[in-house]
Image (cartoon, rainbow, N blue to C red):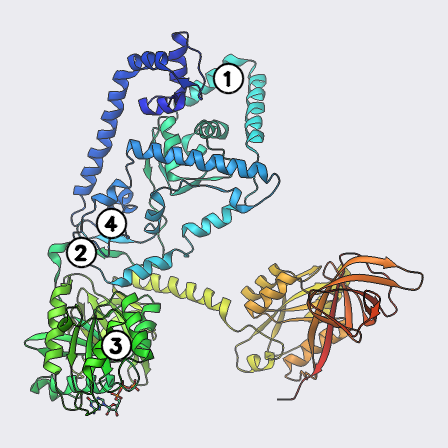
Amino acid sequence: MTKRVYEVAKELGVSASDIIKTLGEHNIKATNFSGVDDQAKHVLDKAYAPKKENTDAHGTRKKAAMQAGKNNGQNVRKNEQRPEKNNKNRNNRPQNNQGQRPETEKGNVRKEGQSRNNFNRQQQNMKKTQQTNQNHQGNQNPNHKGNVNSKNGSQPARENDTKRTKYFGHSQQNNTGRNDNRKNNKHSGPSGHNGKNASNQNRPHTLLSNVLNKGKNKNKRNKNQHGGQNVAMQDTSAKKKNYPTSIELPETIIVKDFAERLGREVSEVIKKLLMGGIMATINQEIDYDTASLIADEFGVAVTKEAPPEDPTEIEEIIDPPESLQPRPPVVTIMGHVDHGKTSLLDAIRQSHITSHEAGGITQHIGAYQVRYEGKKIVFMDTPGHEAFTAMRARGAQVTDIAVLVVAADDGVMPQTIESINHAKSAGVPIIVAINKIDKESANPQQVMQQLTEYGLISEEWGGDTIMVPVSAHKKIGLDDLLENILVLAEVLDLKANPNRPAQGVVIEAKLDKGRGPVASVLIQKGTLHVGDTIIVGSCYGKVRAMTNERGERVKKAEPSIPVEILGLNDVPEAGDILDATDEKTARSVAEKRLEKKRSSELHVNAKVTLDDLFNQIQQGELKELSLIVKGDVQGSVEALSQSLMAIKSDEVRISIVHSGVGAINESDIMLASASNALIIGFNVRPDASARKAAEHENVDMRTYRVIYDAINDVEAAIKGMLEKKYEEHITGRAEVRKVITTPKVIVAGSYIKEGKISSTSKVRLIRNGIVVHEGEVDGLRRFKDDVKEVAEGYECGITLENYRDIKEGDEIEAYEMVEVEPE
Ligand SMILES: Nc1nc2c(ncn2[C@@H]2O[C@H](COP(=O)(O)OP(=O)(O)OP(=O)(O)O)[C@@H](O)[C@H]2O)c(=O)[nH]1
């Protein structure tokens, strides 16, 4: 296929205008989109052959630099090599035992062919987008604007970007699943890419032609101002000297900002984009690959900018493989109710702790260690998959091996299957303990048979699942079980670096009257020492003392070791991650996490309600009553606001966070939710989206037709005297689609949108969210017949008692007052 000028220009590593000029010198007329025929190709080959070599040399330089960066990775904290930071590939990290980063590095330096493919794909995508935009002229569909992201391999890498990582070497460790989960959570984080896109999608869509025209006009103006083309040209050449030769770019950038970084006019950038087949506007976002292609066109080298650091994250340490040492396996016992999980845990504990250890008073700290043939095995003390999944839900995975207990006399039961599925979805290998084999009714063969249905085929039968017959009661088969756990652990090659700051997971935590916050932690990496400063979730402190499950004081805890720690400033939650770090970081990150937590709690917490106002005031939970006042006209809003502010109370101060005219809308609800405010509406109603949002956000809104009633209610609620005798229930909503005028009455030809409307309904007529009338239904008809009620989805004619001013688009809301039983 004949290539176009801009494509050939890219291939040769020169600008399209150079190509056009060169061709022009050989009397070949060309534009950016002209095809390059054999004659033109010959000319260009001749003219640019040496330049191509230069470009290659440049490419090699890039690669050499990359190589150098890679070599620097050894024992360097990630911070010290910012540009590389983008490349830590979290997709690879947990699985990649080799710890090699070249894969990741490639992500930064694009290969020529790859770029072209991306570029071509972008062109195709954009063409599609343009077509769609044309089809939807004037349609502000967010899908058709905002982002011009290429759908290439660069997207997944973005997931990794917000992670703060420090490398203790350039290799990676066989990680636990915890990092996977933490990483996933980041998707929705505040600095996440998604949020950014979402906001960009709301940007107004400017037509490219407008932008270009503006650019043209601007040039014209320049010319006029400076008295001719020469001056303009001088300007440009003067500017040229200040063009940057290299810039840093983030994952995505707005065209305007991009142009600024390039030191170019926006119109120039848009033109270049257009030449590449990408139609972008000044406020549109382009991705890194697209931007770097364009920068290339301007002869500017590009490196990736470090993503903004998440102040609630502790830098991740990547351990080199040579630092990894074997660690004990962590085992969770799962299975159906009453199949003997607790009995098995107890039996193992009793029979496999050495005599001097047995002297201690065993304490429940959520996990315990046993020794078998000189090796340690750690058992999670809480059996059942609930604990297992709860931990996973919080982003922590501590289990290496799941022991599935199946009673030989009962067989596979619902929770057995659930346990299998949970373990499988967490990627945790299963050992089956067929328990209660001492029972006469025991039928281990049948259990093995049943398990085959769930993909667990016993080794005995040629499968790869270890199945051990045991009896917790008679202590049969326990050694066999432990031995098999150790064999599997060896296969799993469980390792961690003990010589680094500790990292672990909270198994349990509580507030002890005498000792303060107490947390049981399972160390996963590094070694925790007494005196270490730690951050655990949003708590922090210095490890004052550590005890093991036998109540003995210990000075340090290595990977896979469970310990109880004292010294935190607050009680963390199970599943919270512990990191040993310096005091300053611990304190500041904990504070940031707390802030984040509080703001998200504010969102989900029960909101202030008029009914519960008195309680909240009495419990000291509420010192200020925030209100949002909406009304039909400014006068009533002001009158209501002033009267509400004038309510006197010793315990609570009233503040109006927002007031306005018009229907209660979604943004009122969101504001109320964020500021824990009540909404008081006077002669107004919430619109449909506001109703939904109020329900979702738990926001209390009250609407009134008499100002006095509103003031009375708030006053009474503060004093705890709000007597709720009646509650309003909305029974139906109708939309007025046609107004039929007869000599006697005005009929609202309506469609029932929700619920039903009956001939005896109390109704209010709402226009643009404002209540224009409240009264009763006079007549209800379907076709020519009077009917008692009309249900959702049907059309009907409604006449209102003593009211004729009905307009198309009005809403008729039917409601009833229901007597509330005193509590
Ligand atoms: N005969 C016999 N009974 C056992 C054995 N193991 C447990 N049991 C009995 O089975 C019943 C349930 O045992 P648990 O250990 O409480 O079972 P679990 O799975 O922990 O039960 P939940 O905690 O309710 O889920 C108890 O009555 C035990 O005594 C065994 O090996 N043989």
Marked residue nearer the N-terminal end (2 or 1) = 1
What is the three-letter code of the residue carrying label 4? Lys
Q: Mark 2 or mark 3: which is in front?
A: 3
Q: Which residue is labeled 2 in the image?
A: 319
Ligand 1 located in image quadrant: bottom left
Mark 4 and mark 3: Cα distance apart in space? 51 Å
Mark 1 and mark 3: Cα distance apart in space? 85 Å
What is the three-letter code of the residue carrying label 1? Ala
What is the three-letter code of the residue carrying label 2? Asp
Residue lying at the far right in this picture: please name it. Answer: 743
Q: Is residue 636 left or right of residue 506?
A: right
Q: Which residue is labeled 3 in the image?
A: 450
Question: 331 and 59: which one is in front?
Answer: 331
Category of crowding for the residue at label 4, using alpha-carbon neighbours closer than 10 angstroms: few (below 14), some (14–19), many (at least 20):
many
Category of crowding for the residue at label 2, using alpha-carbon neighbours closer than 10 angstroms: few (below 14), some (14–19), many (at least 20):
many
Q: Which residue is labeled 4 in the image?
A: 78
Category of crowding for the residue at label 1, using alpha-carbon neighbours closer than 10 angstroms: few (below 14), some (14–19), many (at least 20):
some
Question: 417 and 363: which one is in front?
Answer: 417
Q: Which residue is labeled 1 in the image?
A: 232
What is the three-letter code of the residue carrying label 3? Gln
Category of crowding for the residue at label 3, using alpha-carbon neighbours closer than 10 angstroms: few (below 14), some (14–19), many (at least 20):
some
